[in-house]
Amino acid sequence: MLWRSVLVLPILGVAAAAASIDECPGYTLRNVAESDSQITGDLILAGSACNTYGEDLNNLKLLVEYQTDSRLHVKIYDAKEQVYQIPKSILVPPSGQRDSSSQRSDLVFEYTKNPFSFAVQRSSNRETIFNTSGTNLIFESQYVRLRTSLPQNPNIYGLGEDSDSFRRETTDYTRTLWNTGQAFLPTHSNLYGSHPVYIEMRNGQAHGVFLSNSNGMDIKINQTAEDGQYLEYNTLGGVLDFYFMAGPAPADVARQYAGVVGIPVQQSYWTYGFHQCKYGYQDVMYVAEVVYNYSQAKIPLETMWTDIDYMDLRRTWTLDPERFSLHKMQELVAYLHNHDQQYILMVDPPVSLNDSTSYDTASDAGVLIKNNDGSTFVATMWPGAVSYVDWFHPNAQSFWTGQIKSFFDDQSGVGVDGMWIDMNEPANFCGYPCSNPVEVAIQGNDPPAPPPLRTTWDPLPGFPSDFQPPGSNSRIMRRDTSSANMTGLSGRNLNNPGYTIANGVGPLTVGTIWPELPEYGGYVQYDTHNLYASYMIEASRQGLLARRPSERPFIISRSTFAGDGIRGGHWTGDNASIWAHYLLSIVQNMEFASIFQIPMVGADVCGFNDNTTETLCARWAMLGAWYPFYRNHADITANYQEFYRWPLVTEAAQKAITARFQVLDYFYTAFYQQTVDGSPTTIIPLFFEYPNDPTTLDISYQFFFGPSILVSPVTTESSESVSLYLPPQDIFYDFWTGERVKPNGDSNTLNLDNVTYTDIPVHIRGGSIIPLRADAGNANTTAALRTHDFELLIAPDVDGRATGSLYLDDGKSIKPDRTSYLQFTYDSGHLSVNGTFDYDPGVGFKGVTVLSNGNQNGVNGGGNGTGTDSYGRIGLVRQIDEGFSGGWEVDV
Ligand SMILES: *[C@@H]1O[C@H](CO)[C@@H](O)[C@H](O)[C@H]1NC(C)=O
Ligand SMILES: *[C@@H]1O[C@H](CO)[C@@H](O)[C@H](O)[C@H]1NC(C)=O
Ligand SMILES: *[C@@H]1O[C@H](CO)[C@@H](O)[C@H](O)[C@H]1NC(C)=O
Ligand SMILES: *[C@@H]1O[C@H](CO)[C@@H](O)[C@H](O)[C@H]1NC(C)=O
Ligand SMILES: *[C@@H]1O[C@H](CO)[C@@H](O)[C@H](O)[C@H]1NC(C)=O
Ligand SMILES: *[C@@H]1O[C@H](CO)[C@@H](O)[C@H](O)[C@H]1NC(C)=O
Ligand SMILES: *[C@@H]1O[C@H](CO)[C@@H](O)[C@H](O)[C@H]1NC(C)=O
Ligand SMILES: *[C@@H]1O[C@H](CO)[C@@H](O)[C@H](O)[C@H]1NC(C)=O
Ligand SMILES: *[C@@H]1O[C@H](CO)[C@@H](O)[C@H](O)[C@H]1NC(C)=O
């Protein structure tokens, strides 16, 4: 959702620095107590306080825990434990674990007492991966600084959310973490989410560093003549709560990080279908017509979405009575559900002052954020004057659950199948001090209205006859302009910390609610800002569970913090219909899926802001089919961009969705694997798979979709050429033809110059067995797809061997009664299938196709010889008829 009315009032820093931070004395370590698995000590300020940004804390504590052999916990915190720490209610630290020791651990903690500094070494080769000795530790009430030296030109990944390069810039780079909504995703700026975790690659080995701190911060990566290369944390508060993860493979770091923040949650099978949305669908009839037109165009639409258009005067928890009446919304939902399709609505966090039903409920429950004087905080969002839910309040969950249960009631409300939560940084359009939130709403650059409502309407076959246009469009896009309060904020001190993080929108008050706002339990937004969305996702998840207790809640959130994969997914916000953002989506997907552990991720396909073009949309339709979350979405000011609007894009989308459907169970299995142990198995950067191949360190626009499928889209606009890297450690097969491909010359690159707008280069890694759904082109939903038989595609490695797996369950239950997990092994013409077979999908295995590796390693053990699979891939083919009652073997 575009947010356009930001009023940036620069507030110049006026902090009277008591002393330069260069004069801060650092700390001395005393009273060290060491055991095998733990070190503790006291850190005493080593000289006179510099009090640059608040006061230096005199007494700190050091805690070092050898938690597991591959994970070291280092925490530096105030002795009185008054400084804010991330609440355990949202990020549960791995507790009570001291299962390793300094002798056994892959990582060793070293320290210097005076001035205090510490280093972390890899025990196998004594490589120092973190070393803070270059500068003094600074721990002030509003500023904490710690710097580590790094090797020259380090290979650093992670530290999002942003729109910069995949491999981090190493000079003069600032990565600010302070959740903020910024349309068009400007580079070198903080965006919607905060993920203070990075992976560094050194000589083929990976390690990870997670700073569990939710305060606003600048992480600087720089190299200077005096200081060399470094990475420096500059936070506005909180404590230094570090988890060092030893790898040594990138995938190990991902699993170790999941061990700290949690493993991602499993998603329902249908969520991997194709989704359509647009801001600016004028009414429910129009939405229905989009559904109908997708069906007519034979493009499988799985889930329809509606943006804030459905709301009455943009108030969350209301329906526009004319354009999106309850009756017609229920008819739309019934139609979709009857066709095995789903429906999702956007939900914004604030409550409109003029929606007395919800507002009074929230207010009576006491769950709205208050000003310091006890009055309710009022600011401005889409509906005009609003107040914000205080997620810390003990009644917040019951309020939110109540809203979800009544508004989304399957009988009396709109029976949605998931929640799309937006503006949860949280966004606020009213600049500090917001003395008149109503006035801001009036002046707030109303977005343009969609085209005038049509008055004539051709009945849509299959839809109820009362699907008629409403009488008028009088209420479209109007905002409330009545009866809200001034809230007395003008007399307060702006919470304007002396240290200024490089917040892309300006001072901390811009675009969001004030840092000084108190929350229940003594918290303030200053500290918890970056967690606002996490609490909203969690509350929404609990609300959806209260409504459909056994089903996996599907939640897509704009804002996120470390660990939110355990409760939901993410779309990358308000990108633009530009080539750069088509490319950026690949980087963001890799980061979220493999580094941040939020694998249900995707970007708005064809681009959100501005008009897309036919060729960009065709390319993007084909790329998006290899996102975990595949949704076309556009802004209200952009032209319509449903795939069926152009013949070229229609063809691209049909081909792309058919391919996605072929491998949907393969991807479902890959996603499942990540939910078991955090293995990065969904959208995988090449360096994760080939850590010893330095070429992969700079590959940003090729990725694995699941462990076996390499996707290498065209990376140049208006081009049909791509030069793609084929790691020499493996052999590859063209996904579309089944032919083994070989790099041109010695470069290990494959140069293609005929990638049309309905093609995307996709390759299967040798050594893989991929379970395919047969005849996927004839499935118009994922429910239909689940009735299709399987066939196995075997892409042998150079020695004629391959493995694969298939996880199956009912596709939606949180705790499925029955599951099946099949393991496929192929060696020299012999396929064996083992595993557990408790869930019977009601279909069988009908064919096996073995692609040719060119080495005559495949043995034709009794099939029909060379033929094609049902998609035309040439190989050794055998028809079979096997079910799910137990293991089986066959020669091919
Ligand atoms: C940390 O860096 C300092 C300064 O370069 C160096 O003297 C020290 O040996 C390093 N410590 C470790 C454990 O590498
Ligand atoms: C990097 O170092 C240079 C040289 O000291 C300095 O001018 C620049 O501001 C630094 N950049 C950051 C992001 O700290
Ligand atoms: C649906 O398709 C019809 C026929 O091509 C077209 O007239 C109409 O504008 C389309 N409506 C939408 C919402 O796509
Ligand atoms: C899918 O195809 C079946 C069979 O033709 C049809 O009954 C059903 O309505 C279609 N569903 C959608 C969503 O188009
Ligand atoms: C609005 O103003 C009235 C009158 O000053 C006051 O009683 C009421 O509490 C205010 N409501 C809010 C939400 O601030
Ligand atoms: C998008 O296209 C429409 C009509 O085709 C045009 O009016 C509008 O200005 C375009 N928007 C942009 C941002 O170019
Ligand atoms: C593209 O060119 C390659 C090499 O010339 C050829 O093998 C392949 O069949 C062509 N693909 C298409 C889709 O035309
Ligand atoms: C699969 O089962 C066969 C016997 O049916 C057995 O020989 C083989 O070791 C099993 N393979 C695996 C990977 O468990
Ligand atoms: C060979 O193909 C024929 C015709 O498609 C089929 O009936 C037969 O089952 C196949 N045999 C094997 C071993 O796949």
Image (cartoon, rainbow, N blue to C red):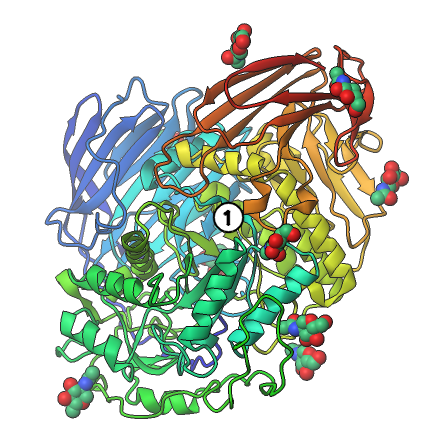
In the rendered image, the vertical position of residue 755 relative to residue 739, given as above or below: below
Q: Residue at x 84, y 33 (%)?
A: 744
Image-based side of 128 in relation to 586, left or right: left
In the rendered image, the vertical position of residue 659 relative to residue 720, given as above or below: above
Is residue 858 positioned above or below 326 on the image?
above
In the rendered image, residue 715, in percent from the top left (x then y), is placed at 72, 52
| Number of numbered discs | 1
Q: Is mark 1 within 8 Å of ligand 4?
A: no
On the rendered structure, is 771 left or right of 479?
A: right
Give the class, few, some or many, for how many residues have Cα within 10 Å of label 1's Cα (few <14, many ≥20).
Answer: some
Whether residue 124 sits left or right of residue 466 in the image: it is: left
Residue 223 visible? The answer is no
Query: From what the image shows, is residue 225 above or below residue 718?
Result: above
Residue type, label 1? Trp
Q: As rendered, which of 779 and 524 lies closer to the eye?
A: 779
SS state under label 1: helix
The location of residue 141, given as percent across then percent down, is 21, 59
Residue drawn at x 50%, y 17% is 886
Name of the residue lying farthest toward the left: 80
Image coords of residue 429 (percent x, y)? 39, 79
Q: Pick the residue in front: 48 or 287.
A: 287
> On the image, which quarter does residue 527 sit in?
bottom left
User: Which percent across, then down, holds residue 738?
Assistant: 77, 31
Q: Is residue 98 among the parts visible in the rendering?
A: yes
Q: Residue at x 55, y 83 (%)?
A: 469
| Lateral position of residue 178 relative to residue 498, left or right | right
Q: Which quarter holds ligand 1?
A: top left
Q: Using the rendered view, name the quadrant where residue 120 is placed.
A: top left
Residue underneath mark 1 = 270
Q: Which residue is drawn at the image coordinates 71% and 35% (left, top)?
A: 763
Quarter of the figure with the C terminus: top right
